[in-house]
Amino acid sequence: MKTIRVALGERSYPIAVRSSYRQLPQLLDSLRLPRHGCVVSHERLLRRHGRGLLAVLRRAGWRLDVVTVPETEASKSWAMARQLISRLAATGAMRPPVLFAFGGGVVGDLTGFVAAIYRRGVPYVQLPTTLLAQVDSAIGGKAAIDLPQAKNFVGAFHQPRLVYSNIGLLRTLPLRQRRSGLGEVIKYGAMADPALFAFLEQHLAACLAMEPRAARVMVERSSAIKARIVSQDERDARGIRAQLNFGHTLGHALEAAGRYRRWTHGEAIAIGMCAAAQLSVELGRCPRGQMQRLVALLQAAGLPTRARGVSRAAVRRALAYDKKNLRGRPRWVLLRRLGRVVVSEAIPPTTLQRVVSAYLS
Ligand code: GLY
């Protein structure tokens, strides 16, 4: 199985894709970290899958504390960050513990944020357990908590020392979460990897079932794309990392309009990708057949391709909020063809309004 490198000079790190935690201690040893850690996770996840992980680390001589947080987005808060920091400070250890984020995006973002600010930055390791986290949020060092006004509004770039993705866990995820993660994998295929896209088309049932080979291909290929893009544009300042947001302009607005309960992230970006592809076709930037293949794959994966029953006003408000944060210009990632996208801030407003409205019903 593969180890992929995120090349960032002295902040470089490996992404190990494995089917168990057996090789984790060996990889940690190569990083020369103190064998004292704090595992941040969820209670249910720890009960289900934590025993094996903790046993492997303890057998290798790791001294570990364990902290659990509730399984909701609300855990990405100042209150939870403060609680976690108090726990870390209470150990009184001279050398701060290595933080382990064992969970999905919520645990990864919160742990990364605390690791960024506690004692001006301590090392942390991402142990993502969902498909979405393995292919996206655990990689790239974007760490943040939410404010009541908006998601991810307080944060930092703080790269982990290691991402260790155990794909053996993915089969146990509920179907809706597997589909949601698949939405991000389809995004990688559409934006950067036609061979991955074709693989998903040909082996969709195996991908949805998280069969070992399919899971490995999805996580390895997606991680390699994200690693390459983060290496080129770590701080999202060159318009390269922005390509990862294919489907996210409308996707984020739908998540906000649905109060983060109506759609999962993968569902919202599936609708967002359809709208962005339609926009690309109408602007003459993408052949219609390419868009149709994308829509067909999303539908076959059981993902929504239109937003039904959403308040148009709420979506418009969320899109306007996004626009305000981007110096008044809405930024869309357009599809050129499957495997290639382009970032644009020059979309004619009337076309935009017409296309977005067509996706809200
Ligand atoms: N998930 C988008 C990024 O990491 O930049």
Image (spheres, rainbow, N blue to C red):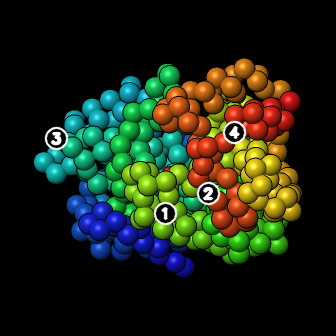
Question: Which residue sits at x=81%, y=68%?
Answer: 201
Check disc 4: other Cα within 10 Å, few if <14, some if 14-19, many if 20+: few
Camera-side mark, 2 or 3? 2
Asked whether the residues under the numbered discs 1 and 3 touch, taking CB atoms below 8 Å apart as contact, a structural biologist would say no
If you read the primary sequence from the N terminus, does the residue marked by circle 2 or circle 3 appear first?
3
Q: Distance between the residues labelled 2 and 1?
A: 14 Å
Check disc 3: other Cα within 10 Å, few if <14, some if 14-19, many if 20+: few
The answer to whether residue 298 is left or right of residue 335 is right
- Which corner quadrant of the image does residue 220 belong to? bottom right
Q: How far apart are marks 1 and 3 (CA)?
A: 39 Å
Question: Which residue sits at x=72%, y=47%?
Answer: 276
The answer to whether residue 210 is left or right of residue 72 is right
- The residue identified by callout 2 is 342
Check disc 1 and give the amino acid type. Ile
- The residue identified by callout 4 is 348
Q: In this view, does 217 lie above or below 108?
A: below
Check disc 3 and give the amino acid type. Gly
Residue 160, horizontal then vertical, whole percent: 36, 57
Does residue 20 show up? no
Residue sitting nearer the eye, 200 or 323 = 323
Check disc 2: other Cα within 10 Å, few if <14, some if 14-19, many if 20+: some
Identify the secondary structure beneath mark 2: strand
Question: Which residue sits at x=50%, y=58%?
Answer: 240
Camera-side mark, 2 or 1? 2
Residue 259, horizontal then vertical, whole percent: 65, 26
Identify the secondary structure beneath mark 4: loop
Check disc 2 and give the amino acid type. Val
The answer to whether residue 136 is left or right of residue 268 is left
Mark seen at residue 92: 3
- Which corner quadrant of the image does residue 140 belong to? bottom left
- The residue identified by callout 1 is 229
